């Protein structure tokens, strides 16, 4: 009997002590062995090196593992493998790497060069240094362009600073994101059109001699019964820096809200990184909500932040569960503090650029304060053909992942950008408010404009400040077109670029007669310019902002109502400025 029990114990304990001998070789694209390549095993957290013939072999405890391979002169590589199978790994030489990412612009005026400004530091948080757009001569430079995107992270991040009685870093204030946070003046496109366009011209509240030009692009709303099946990969940062109430616990609550609205045709996977990278949940149907929710709830924070490796694994997993003609998207949730592997914005930009051709979108959710890497998350979302939101509380999480899910997670068009050609007979000078470029982007003489993703049911509003041409009589001005607009876009995952063209009528309307939503957008713009502390807008007063906001806000909308309280809070923080 004792022998029988002993045999049983040995039998059932065998899986615990199972070992696998992982073997393989590493070669370059010319089929030559790569010796002395460093291999990092994520499951056992140990380093190994290839021999003279590029071969390797070591003992593993798990059937699956993630390997990261690095060696000077070659691109780093991270792969998910089965340890009982031979691995033939190909490394690509850095000198032969293709599709290097170029620094792209948010807005560009052909042949016009801007000057740069000063950098603002705030603790360990990082923000791209932005350069304010300038007034441009319509006679010398009649054409200008800018990228359309539905990023809304700036507004909730600004709200976070103000709610903690802190001055907002000027570079954290992105005017276009502040305005488009509210999805103002949305009107559904007619018939089967993908976009609807509207333009308005009115007087400028802070300078009566100038005018404001409003350009409003509305994207088609996908009907609920037409929403394609989705393949979601949650890429969640569970490193030690996430062990705070407004980080991992907030994300867990946010994802649990999101999961409750999944359909049976949707699939969810989870990749985590904290100390090492692992597949926390393999592809699971949206009908199995209990399993997904339990998996999310069991997450705990600890370890380093190997973000680069985690991104590679998430893309590999998304490719394996790819849904043809579906919505394939990675949702990265982090404070952005990568400290293992490639960590620079440039290196991460190149990594994501290579992945964007797969048809997999990347949405970034930022959390935390004190070390938020806003600049990294901007890069990842932009290059990943996706968008970026900042979650400062559970209400914002519900807005992003539940109430406005179609705008944030279901794209109707990619690489969307707009070109405007102004009529110099009517316009002396013009200035795009917001859509400011990163300082480093202005060093790129190629002047490449990169479009953005536009989500279902989105309203994107752009505002120009205009100095009218005083050489024409008013009667003559009314008979002329203000300018021409060309909207460029690609249908999801299509390589063909499409164009829509509009004329901008000289439809001047007094500011008092303007639609309330355009007035409210103007108030947000003034608020944004005030927070950015531009010398050119010092004449904008808090009383002006308050009056215009109160007279145009929809008091039944809790977000617009909340904005009114933010103005009062900001006035107290900034004092007499």
Image (spheres, rainbow, N blue to C red):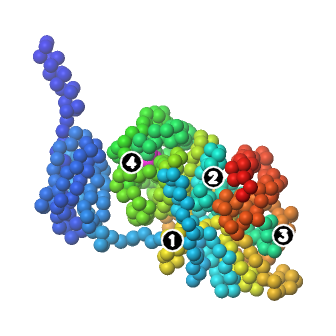
Sequence order check, earlier mark of 2 and 1: 2
Q: Position of residue 342 (x, y in %)?
A: 36, 58
Relative to 211, residue 576 above or below: above
Res 77 quadrant in image:
bottom left
Which residue corresponds to mark 2? Answer: 167
For residue 509, which numbered disc appears in the image?
3
For residue 441, which numbered disc appears in the image?
1
Q: Residue at x 50, y 67 (%)?
A: 494
Q: Residue furthest front?
A: 576
Range of residues picked out in magenta: 232-236
Which residue corresponds to mark 4? Answer: 305
Q: Is residue 557 left or right of residue 379?
A: right
Sequence order check, earlier mark of 4 and 3: 4
Please state which of residues 147 and 469 is positioned toward the viewer in this rendering: 469
Label 4 neighbour load within 10 Å: few <14, some 14-19, many 20+: many
Give the spatial CA distance, label 3 vs label 1.
Answer: 36 Å
Q: Is residue 477 visible?
A: yes
Quarter holding the C terminus is: bottom right
Residue 210 inside the magenta-drawn segment: no
Q: Residue at x 26, y 48 (%)?
A: 41
Q: Position of residue 10 (x, y in %)?
A: 16, 25
Tags 3 and 2 in contact by the CB under 8 Å rule? no
Give the spatial CA distance, label 1 vs label 4.
Answer: 28 Å
């Amino acid at each position: 009997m004792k022998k029988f029990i002993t045999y049983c114990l040995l039998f059932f304990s065998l899986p615990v002590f199972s070992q696998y001998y992982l073997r393989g070789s590493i070669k370059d694209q010319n089929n030559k062995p790569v010796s002395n390549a460093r291999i990092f095993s994520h499951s056992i957290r140990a380093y190994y090196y290839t021999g003279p013939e590029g071969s390797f072999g070591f003992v593993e405890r798990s059937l699956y593992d993630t390997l990261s391979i690095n060696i000077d002169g070659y691109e780093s590589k991270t792969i998910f493998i089965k340890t009982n199978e031979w691995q033939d790994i190909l490394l690509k030489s850095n000198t032969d790497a293709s599709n290097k990412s170029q620094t792209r612009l948010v807005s560009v005026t052909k042949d016009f060069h801007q000057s740069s400004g000063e950098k603002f530091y705030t603790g360990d948080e990082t923000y791209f240094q932005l350069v304010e757009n300038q007034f441009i001569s319509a006679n010398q430079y009649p054409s200008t362009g800018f990228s359309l995107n539905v990023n809304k992270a700036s507004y909730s991040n600004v709200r976070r600073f103000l709610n903690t009685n802190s001055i907002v870093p000027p570079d954290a204030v992105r005017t276009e994101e502040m305005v488009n946070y509210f999805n103002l003046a949305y009107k559904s496109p007619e018939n089967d059109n993908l976009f609807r366009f509207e333009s308005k011209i009115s007087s400028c509240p802070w300078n009566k001699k100038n005018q404001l030009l409003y350009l409003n692009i509305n994207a088609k709303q996908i009907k609920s019964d037409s929403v394609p099946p989705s393949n979601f990969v949650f890429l969640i940062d569970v490193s030690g820096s996430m062990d705070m109430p407004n980080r991992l616990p907030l994300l867990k609550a946010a994802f649990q809200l999101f999961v409750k609205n999944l359909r049976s045709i949707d699939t969810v996977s989870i990749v985590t990184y904290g100390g090492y990278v692992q597949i926390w949940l393999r592809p699971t149907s949206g009908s199995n909500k209990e399993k997904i929710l339990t998996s999310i709830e069991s997450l705990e924070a600890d370890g380093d932040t190997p973000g680069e490796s985690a991104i590679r694994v998430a893309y590999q997993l998304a490719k394996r569960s790819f849904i043809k003609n579906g919505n394939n998207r990675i949702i990265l949730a982090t404070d952005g503090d990568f400290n293992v592997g490639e960590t620079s914005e440039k290196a991460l930009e190149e990594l994501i650029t290579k992945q964007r051709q797969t048809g997999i979108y990347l949405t970034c959710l930022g959390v935390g304060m004190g070390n938020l890497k806003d600049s990294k998350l901007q890069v990842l979302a932009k290059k990943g053909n996706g968008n970026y939101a900042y979650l400062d509380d559970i209400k914002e999480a519900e807005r992003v992942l539940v109430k406005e899910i179609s705008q944030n997670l279901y794209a109707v068009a990619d690489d969307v950008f707009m070109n405007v050609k102004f009529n110099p007979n009517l316009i002396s000078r013009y200035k795009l408010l917001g859509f400011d470029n990163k300082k480093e982007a202005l060093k790129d003489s190629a002047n490449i404009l990169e479009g953005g993703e536009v989500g279902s049911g989105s309203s994107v509003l752009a505002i120009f400040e205009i100095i009218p041409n005083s050489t024409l009589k008013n009667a003559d001005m009314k008979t002329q077109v203000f300018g021409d607009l060309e909207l460029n876009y690609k249908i999801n995952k299509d390589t063909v670029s499409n164009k829509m063209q509009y004329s901008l009528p000289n439809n001047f309307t007094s500011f008092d007669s303007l639609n309330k939503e355009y007035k409210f957008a103007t108030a947000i713009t003034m608020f944004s310019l005030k927070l950015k502390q531009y010398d050119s807008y010092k004449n904008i007063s808090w009383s002006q902002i308050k009056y215009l906001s109160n007279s145009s806000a929809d008091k039944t909308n809790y977000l617009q109502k909340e904005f009114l309280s933010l103005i009062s809070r900001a006035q107290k923080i900034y004092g007499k400025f």
